[in-house]
Image (cartoon, helix red, strand yellow):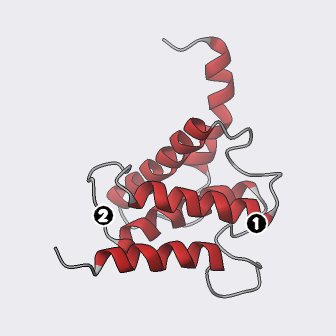
Amino acid sequence: MFPAQSRTAAAPLLVAVYDTISWPPKSAHKFGTVCSHRIHYLQFASDLKLPDPLLEKAPPCMCQLVAAMYAVHVGSGSNLFSPQIRLNTVKHYVNDMASLVGMATAYRDTRKDNPTYPKVGRILTSVHNELKRYETVPN
């Protein structure tokens, strides 16, 4: 069905999706959701033609920019089920993307400016604030 080159290129990514969950899932549904969000991110990275979708060699600012672009992508209606989703759901998508990338980058949290900071970085925070503002606009 897929050419051999495609299967060879996709194999490490699929292993990363399924084998790098660092916590026992609470349910099969939660496991499926995390895997679906991760595959959705890999499709996004493929659409962007990122040379390194797991951002292993990318500097922290580039990782945060990719996370912000992914949040905008998901929040603008390019998600798995619904054309419009709430900010908390966007955060779940980005958290699952960050956990996938974090496993490949020695547990570096791509959402933060500095790994020691407890809060999400300024770029991603501004995207979250804009999505929250959009949610509060009356119909």
When asked about the image quadrant of residue 4, the answer is: top right
Q: Which of 111 and 96 lies nearest the eye of the viewer?
A: 111
From the image, which quarter does the C terminus lie in?
A: bottom left
Say left or right for 132 vs 120: left
Q: Residue at x 34, y 53 (%)?
A: 77
Q: Which of 41 and 26 lies nearest the eye of the viewer?
A: 41
Say left or right for 17 vs 107: left
Secondary structure state at the residue bearing disc 1: helix
Say left or right for 4 vs 139: right
Crowding at dot 2, Cα within 10 Å, few <14 / some 14-19 / many 20+, comes out as some
Q: Is residue 36 above or below residue 129?
A: above
Secondary structure state at the residue bearing disc 2: loop
When asked about the image quadrant of residue 28, the answer is: bottom left
Q: Residue at x 64, y 36 (%)?
A: 49
Which mark, by number, is residue 61? Answer: 1
Q: Is residue 27 above or below residue 73?
A: below
Residue 88 x %, y %: 38, 74
Total residue callouts: 2
What residue is disc 2 on?
Answer: 85
Circle 1: residue type: Cys
Q: Residue furthest left?
A: 139
Residue 58 x %, y %: 80, 54
The earlier-in-sequence mark between 2 and 1 is 1
Which mark, by number, is residue 49? Answer: none
Q: Which of 23 and 85 lies nearest the eye of the viewer?
A: 85
Q: Residue at x 55, y 37 (%)?
A: 47
**Residue 14 visible (yes or no):** no
**Residue 87 visible (yes or no):** yes
Disc 2/disc 1 C-alpha distance (Å): 26 Å
Circle 2: residue type: Ile
Residue 35 x %, y %: 46, 50
